[in-house]
Amino acid sequence: MSFVSRSFLLFLIISLSCYFISPRRFRWYVLLLSGYVFYWFVGGPVAVAAISFTVMTVYFSGRWAGMLRKKKARISLRRAPLALCLTANIALLAFFKFGSYVLPSAGIFLIPGISFYTFQASGYLIDVYRGKAPPEKNPLKTALFLSFFPLLIQGPISRHSEIANDLIAGHGWDWERLRSGIQRIIWGYFMKLIIADYAAPIVNTVFTDYGNIAGAVIVFGVLIYSIQIYADFAGGINIALGIAEIVGVKLPENFRQPFFASSLTDFWRRWHITLGTWLKDYLFFPLALSKPMNRLGRFSRKIFGNRVGKLLPSCLATFCVYLVVGAWHGLGMHLIAFGLINGVLISADLFAQPGLEKLRKKTGIYGSRPGFGRVFACLRTFGILLFLRYFARAESLREALIMLKQTVLRPRFNELISGGLMDLGLDGMGYIILAFGIIVLFTRDYITERGTDCGKMLNAYRPAVQFILLLIALSSIVLFGFYSGNVVSANFIYAGM
């Protein structure tokens, strides 16, 4: 039951109706039941059993950790519940996420969204261990925190302190929240159905038949893939945020105009923000500030000087973080390479900052202010991202390298204008719809990047204008999305993570 299925829309209407007609003190039970019903339809009994295991181990470990902290037990003893629970749940995650590499035909390994709620559960438990969050006393509230259905499949990864109170508050009906939530849901469906799904045939054809396609057309396909994955992932997140807003739950933002990033580091601050924040708080800082890293830093200062000694632990921690990012996408060598290249480039950028700062002051090329410098920085970053997307989307490292070789040695630019694009699985009308969607996407992101809230801007128009704009958006989604014969809507790319 994907977000883009008619069965989900029916489920959503029933769930929201039950939520608002229930007495306030029972509304969080409706959300809890909705989460488990939704997950049953999405993943079946194995998925429900997996998340129930996580809920119970996290609940009891959190209570245990809280009790030991209250009694001021020694550190080694307080680490026991954390270590046991994390080990059990990471092992479960590894089994379901990577078991298909051993037995590709085994359907038991298909557990949607398991990495998202495992990250969320782990963050909560670590916060309890650190004393930054109180242990939850009610196991059903722990279950609701991990199974809230809008964020269950692909996030955003939320902190217990951010959403726990909203989940159980039983918020009443609010027209402003309803209007804002529906606007966000419509925008999410537009991104998914009008952009991502129309881009999919092009991307699938290029990455399947790359051996018979000119290098310039491959670049076009990789560019379209970069837009597709953004529209697909951010579209699903917008639907989730819109649904949550209707019931009064404020979920964290997960994207911030990533194509306007001025550097690779800036891109990762804008892309999948909640995962980046999670990795920073629970992996990067513990690694960078660990005793071995401190010893390495002191040793490096003696050999290479203060600057290198200061940067080296951060670079190694950064390298490890992006290696995890690559492995999170899968165990293929192309995905490991994706993570490693990110780590190398971002670490190199840390060392190059003094030189870049001097160049920035002299030329303004790498500046963050509007103008040629900012445009150049964004285009340069986008070029790096295109290179990385070869590895992210390819089925193997060999395939990615062959496609890069085709791109460099056999560009054949004439095929871009001689009909080669019409052989990629999308007809002329499909290209028009896709182009329209991309223009709307970048226009909206540009307006937002300039500091204008598009939702507030829409609400400032007269009701008649708002109605016409929303009617156009809905008509586009229904006619060219749900009921289009040009493309078939697929599940969200990150739904299987």
Image: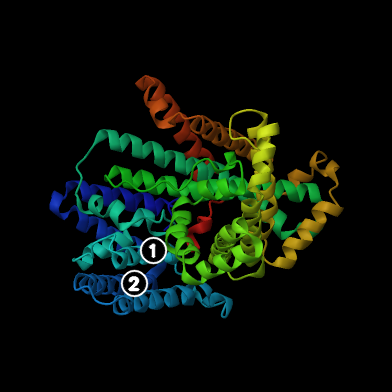
Nearest the camera: 289 or 84? 289
Quadrant position of residue 64: bottom left
Q: Position of residue 317 (x, y in %)?
A: 54, 63
Q: Position of residue 205 (x, y in %)?
A: 70, 54
Check residue 54 in the rendering and tell me which mark sits there, or answer none. 2
Specify whether 397 is left or right of 4. right
Mark 2 belongs to which amino acid? Thr
Quadrant position of residue 195: top right
Using the image, determine if residue 243 lies above or below residue 72: above
Using the image, determine if residue 175 lies above or below residue 339: above
Q: Position of residue 181 (x, y in %)?
A: 35, 39
- For the point 47% across and 68% down, which residue is it? 290
Nearest the camera: 474 or 34? 34
Q: Secondary structure at mark 2?
A: helix
Quadrant position of residue 52: bottom left
Residue 485 in sight here: no
How many numbered marks are there? Answer: 2
Colouring convention used in this rendered image of the protein: rainbow
Q: Position of residue 437 (x, y in %)?
A: 57, 37
- For the point 47% across and 70% down, which residue is it? 291
Mark 1 belongs to which amino acid? Tyr
Check residue 117 in the rendering and tell me which mark sits there, or answer none. 1
Specify whether 398 is left or right of 85. right
Marks 2/1 in contact by CB < 8 Å: the verdict is yes
